[in-house]
Amino acid sequence: MKTTSKSIRTFIGAKNYTESRQFYNELGFTEFVIDQKMSLFKVNEQLAFYLQDYYVKDWINNSMVFLEVDDVDECAQELLSKGLHEKYKYVRFTEIKEYDWGREIFMHDPSGVLWHFGEFIESKVDA
């Protein structure tokens, strides 16, 4: 592509839009309301996703988002310290998993979207 790319953003749905919006705000994302059925959630200026008030079980249950972090231990501690898995019925986390490419912790959001918070081994960054 010759066009300069500025960001890439995925769209994810929500079984309960109000609950999901609250969850992502509590998780630490910054919300920008687009309209009554869609919000943009940002981690920083380059990293963001769209949350929409739309739910198809097969789509949501097969949606995954990978967020690369620089320290998965610190990330896991921060995620778990928020207690969101105790507050939201369907939110759950795994233990940190070790792979040949790096390490990651998994999180299911209130609708079932699977998040990967991963840290690459320096030599595997181009994977």
Image (tube, rainbow, N blue to C red):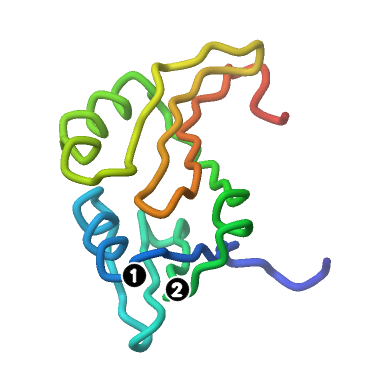
Residue 39 pos. (x, y %): 37, 75
Mark 1 packing: few (<14 Cα in 10 Å), some, or many (20+)? many
| Vertical comparison of 75 with 90: above or below | above
Image quarter in which the C terminus is found: top right
Q: Where is residue 98 in the image (x, y as percent from the top left)?
A: 54, 11
Q: Toward the viewer: 56 or 65?
A: 56
**What amino acid type should be assigned to the residue bearing mark 1?**
Tyr
Looking at the image, is mark 1 or mark 2 earlier in the sequence? 1
Image disc number at residue 17: 1
> At numbered mark 1, what does the secondary structure look like: helix, strand or loop?
helix
- The residue wearing badge 2 is 52
Residue 3 falls in image quadrant: bottom right
Amino acid on which disc 2 is placed: Gln
User: In the visual, does 99 lie left or right of 96?
Assistant: right
Q: Are marks 1 and 2 in contact (CB under 8 Å)?
A: yes
Q: Is residue 101 left or right of residue 40?
A: right
Residue displayed at 42% across by 29% down: 70
Q: What is the CA distance from the residue labelled 1 to the residue labelled 2?
A: 7 Å
Number of residue marks:
2
Q: Where does residue 99 sit, x and y in percent of width and height?
A: 61, 13
Residue extending farthest to the bottom is: 35
Residue at 36% across, 29% down: 93
Q: Give 23 or 73, whichever is nearer the viewer.
A: 23
Q: In this view, does 113 lie above or below 102?
A: below
| Disc 2 crowd, CA 10 A, few/some/many (<14, 14-19, 20+) | many
Viewer-side residue, 41 vs 47: 41
